[in-house]
Image (spheres, rainbow, N blue to C red):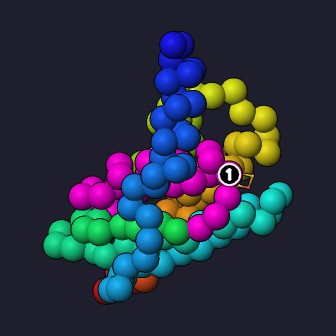
Amino acid sequence: MSSADIYRELILDYYRNPRNFGKLEKFDISAHDTNPLCGDEIEMQIRVGENSKIEEIKFSGRGCAISQASASMLTELAKGKPLEWVKLVAKEDVFKMLGDPELGPSRVKCALLGMKVLKTGVYGYLGAHYEDPEPGT
Ligand code: FES
């Protein structure tokens, strides 16, 4: 089995048995986005714990294997990390997590949908809760 096969299996496994799939009853962050090319969607909810850590995170949505697997893998990575960690996540990290598959432009959007939702939610929360003090105050 080549490493590409192994990653393909892994993506299918996450698609069929998505980790952290569902909704949280109590959450501090919620974000949602769709892939404009196909209309597929992902929603993420996060409960923020002590020291601004991602205490609990879940996602839901519908879409292709790569979009759902990527979102699910990201929730696993994010759990327990500080919110600030989300700022460091780059698209290359997501591609690496998926085994660096060859992706055409439309599939790139699939792979990055989860990251986009995660960043949208966390950036919005950080902006609302930790704004820089006004200069001179
Ligand atoms: Fe819709 Fe991949 S085909 S997110």
Among the 4 quarters of the image, the one containing residue 48: bottom left
Q: Amino acid at mark 1?
A: Cys
- Residue 84 pos. (x, y %): 34, 59
Task: Decide which of 39, 91 is in the foreground and name it.
Answer: 39
Q: Position of residue 111 (x, y in %)?
A: 63, 46
Q: Residue furthest front?
A: 16
In the rendered image, the residue lying farthest to the left is: 50
> What span is colored magenta in the figure?
61-85
Q: How many marks?
A: 1
Q: Residue furthest top?
A: 2
In the rendered image, which quarter contains the C terminus? bottom left
Q: Position of residue 101 (x, y in %)?
A: 63, 28
- Work out whether 64 lies above or below 57: above
- In this picture, residue 36 sits left or right of residue 51: right
Q: Which residue is mark 1?
A: 64
Extreme residue toward the right, this view? 37
Disc 1 C-beta below 8 A from ligand 1: yes
